[in-house]
Structure formats: C-alpha cells, structure tokens
Amino acid sequence: MNTALRLGILGGAALTLLVGAVCIGPTQLLDVPRLVDLLRSGPVTPELQRAQLVLWELRLPRVLLAAAAGVNLALGGLLLQAIFRNPLAEPYLLGLSSGGALGAVLALAAGATAVTWPALTGGLLIAGIVLLLCRRRIAADLPSLLLVGVALGALAQAFTTVIILRFDPGALRSILFWLMGSFAGRGWSEVWLLVPAALLGIVIVCVLHRPLDLVALGGESAHHLGVRVGLLQTGGIALAAVLAALTVAACGTIGFVGLMAPHLARRLTGAPHGMSIPATALVGAMLTVGADLAARTVLAGTELPVGAVTGVFGCLFFLALLAKRP
Amino acid sequence: MLQGRGVRAGYEATDVLHGIDFALHAGEVLGVVGPNGCGKSTLLRAVTGLLPLRGGEVILGEERLENLPAMERARRCAVQPQVEAPLFDYTVGQFVLLGRHPHRAPLALATGEDRAAVSRALSETGMNGLRERSIRALSTGEWQRALMARALAQETPVLLLDEPAAHLDPGHRFAVHVLLRRLAREQQRAVLCVSHDLNLAAEFCDRLMILASGRVRALGRPEEVLTAENLQAVFQCDALRVAPNPFTGRPGTVFVP
C-alpha cells in the first residue's frame, strides 16, 4: 500500500475519533441530525442550550486539547529520537516534562494561577542543563546525555513531590490529578495555547525533515552533507522542551506518548521523516484522544488520570521495544 | 581543489596532527596510508571542518574552509565515512537520495536530476539490485557500498573516502579502486582515499601520502614513496618488503615471514 494512502486512512481514522469523542458519550445529546435541526429552526429550548454548552464548552475544547497535547508530545519524541539516535528517547524520559511540572508546581505553591511561563522555564532549564553538560564534555556522547536527562528528570520529580506535600490536603488531590495528566476541566484558553503550538511545531519539524533524517543516520555524515549538527541538536532539544512544557502547563504530565507515536508512525510510513512526521502527529493525537476516552469510560463513574492510562500502555510498549532490540 | 597548509588538529589535550601540508588536484587520486593512529581519519575530520583547526588553514576551491556556509561546503566536498551501524530503517534508495540534500531546498521534492544522480550512484557502486532493500538488512560490505553511493550522489568536485574498501571482498575492492580512478580521469574529480591496502593504493593512486605520528613522512608518486626505508620506518615490520607487481610493474609490497 502506498504511503500517501496509508496517511489518508490514518487521517480519516483520526478525524473519526475526534468527531466521535466530541459527539458520542454518556450524555443524551447524541442525536446529531436532530441537534442540527434544532440549531437551524427550532426555538431555543433548555435541552438545546444544555447540548450546546456540553458540546462547545466541554467536549470540543477537551478533544482539541487532547489532540494538540498528543501532537506536541509525539513531535517531541520524534525530534529527540532522531537527535539522540536513540529509539527510546522522548520528552518524559528525558526529564523535559518533569522540569515543566516542577516549574508549574513551584508557581502554584507561590500562589500563582497561571503556570505556562513557569512550566516553560522548568522544561527549558532541564534542556539547558543537558546541553550545557554536553558542551562541557561531561556527557559528550549521546547515550550519556540521555542518562543525564533521566537523572535530572528524577531530581525534578523529587523536588515536585516535596513541594506538593506542603500543599493543604484540599488542593492536594486536584494538583495530583493534574500532575498525572488530565484534560478534565480545561477550556478554550488552554486550547488556544496548545493548538497553535502544535501547528507551529508541525511546520518547523517538517522544514527540518531531511536534516533530521541525516542526523538520525549519523552525526558526522550529517555534517558532511551540510547539516549544522550542533545547531540542530540545540534547537531540536529546545523545541521538544517547549512543546513538552506547554503541554504540561495545559494538562499535566503524560508519559510515553512521545515514545509510542513515532514508532507506530514509522511502522506505517517507513523511517524517512518526510512521511513519518505527519503520521507521527496523527498517531500522537489518536493516542491521547483514545487514552482520554479510556480514562473517562473504563471505570464507570470515576475518571482516571490520562497519564495513568498512557503509563500502563507505554510501559508495556517500552518493554516490547527493549525485547525487540538486537 | 583542496589544500592543507600546516594543518594542526587534535582531541582534548592531545595534538594528533602536527602541521600537515598537502594539495589535492582535480583529476587525481591521492592515497593516504600509514599505521593505525597516525592521524589519517583525523586529517579527514580536520579538512572537512568536523574538527576545529588548532593551526594552519584549509582551502577548498578558492576559499578558506571556515568561510564556506555548511551547504556550500557540502556541494563542493563529499565524504564517505567509516562504517557505523544504522539505527533506522531506510531503504537503500531513500538513503542514497539523502546525498542530494545539499542540492535541495528544505521542502522541495526530488527532481528528475536528483533521481538520475541516485541511479548513477547506485549503478556505479553495483547497488542497483538492492535499491528497495532496508539498510539494516545489508551486509557490512553492501552497507559500505551504500555509503559510497550516497557520497557519489552528492556529485561534488572533491571526494574524500575513509577506507572505502575496508569491508569489501577482493572483487568489489578492485571495482571501487577502478571507479575512483575513473571518477578522477573522466570527471576531473579530486579524490582522496585513506587506505590500508598498500598494493591497491600503489596501483590506482596517482600519488601517495604516508603519514606517521601526525606528520607527512613522504608525499609523491608511489614508486618514490613506497621504499623499503619508508615502510620500515613507518610500519616497523621486517616482514613487509617492497616488490613491484610482475604484471604492471607498479610498486607493491609482499610479506616475507
């Protein structure tokens, strides 16, 4: 099957999932033709008002947010896997998400309500330290750079835990839930933050598709073919950090999507980034929207954190990947 | 085409190259030989800007290397690196097409010219039948030829190769050297080839440069350079003797244990 067709099918599936997640669910507003009828002609009934409210203020932003978060994390994973030449790299494992979470929790502890900038600072700080250690030759080779990220991520998580314990018990539950990743209770303001970031991310990564191919196949060769490898590494890690930190600011820490999406996409399209970038974005969106659906519906009456759902699947995926490596 | 003047380079506290002077001309194959660790690969890294110079200068075409933008450098000079295992699953065709990167705009699709260059590179390296094969499924020798095909697809006036025949069987080793000489003769390319095969180097290179401990021990035509004295001084192996090829008369070496 040719790659464009596969991408088309994937796009169709993603669209179906998005529409489904918006329109289908436990509430009673599912009769879409009737809804459209009502919107066109009928008087404004309380039923219609409620349906509109649910659709526009709850479902649609939630699904768009989930999709954008998936795209951001997936693109982050794709960038890091190419740059580190390591199929196990992703924003969560590299500590970028944990840095974002630490920044956000620090801000909340200080009484702030907006966590976007603190989260960005936290994510970029981790990326900066990783890059600085790379320049200082403390971790000159790529595998040890990745381990530095893992270590810094663990440190950030430790600090986050200590800070969280100082919150009063009332706030604790909601903060924990947010930290574990959730699209509940988010609105259009988060959508306006994440969706443009995701679109911009797709454009930048698409422009870089061939340099990413070359770097993924070897740093020295990439240099010989005209890629400014140091610049691409710095910029790529920074971009992954920004995308991950924005996602954390909007909906908490969601692990493993960045790991799974690029792999699944490469299975569909092959390794060249020209095709695997759009596929990775689509798969990422499908994973988070699907995980959100699962989080809302697996246990009746209880909503699970999305991060817990992706964590379960991601862990299995990670182990399968390790077992497959030569 | 490519000139080094007093090139000094190294890693961290160690200087590996202590002032290398050489000039590579269009239409010639220059062989670089020498013992392990003498600085052959470091020389390739230094003259391609991968390793910062600690002294001297490198001129590519008419310009100093550091003044050339990365993409312009890649349009003038291609490098076949030593073999390192690929991690991602590209087909041979996709991989060789990446050699066209310096000639393409960021989002441009491959043009007819790009495809023609890829086809030429594949057939010159005998890889035509493997175009759809995954690079991870290639033998080491095939992978080495794929690396060469990518460098050829770059279509640069200067071609630098780091042991291009290291993993090849005798037939392909010979074919690679024939190809290098043909590229120099017919297309006026400047070819520099690092090699451990003294006999093939002497047979096919117009000039040889012997490196020892980061310095040029000898540079000239093979019969001037491959002398018993030079070999003994550089390789320190009594069994290695100079013996001309009885069929071609070119200089060569044999082991006399």
Image (spheres, coloured by chain):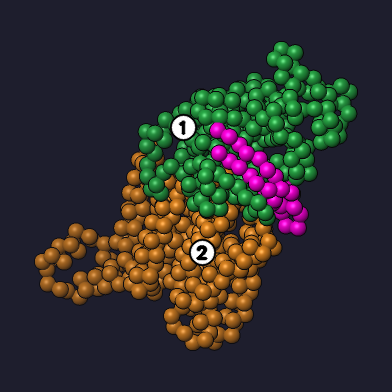
B220 to the left or right of A266: right
Residue in the image at 35% along x and 74% along y: A189
Colour of chain A as rendered: orange
Q: Amino acid at mark 2?
A: Ala
For residue A143: magenta? no
Q: Position of residue A240 (x, y in %)?
A: 50, 62
User: What's drawn in magenta, residue-wise?
Assistant: B1-26
Residue at disc 1, secondary structure: helix
Q: Nearer the viewer, residue A76 or A261?
A: A76
What residue would you read off at disc 1? B118
CA separation in Å, label 2 and label 1 = 34 Å
B104 to the left or right of B173: left
Image quarter of residue A36: bottom left
Colour of chain B as rendered: green
Residue in the image at 54% along x and 27% along y: B183
Residue in the image at 50% along x and 37% along y: B156
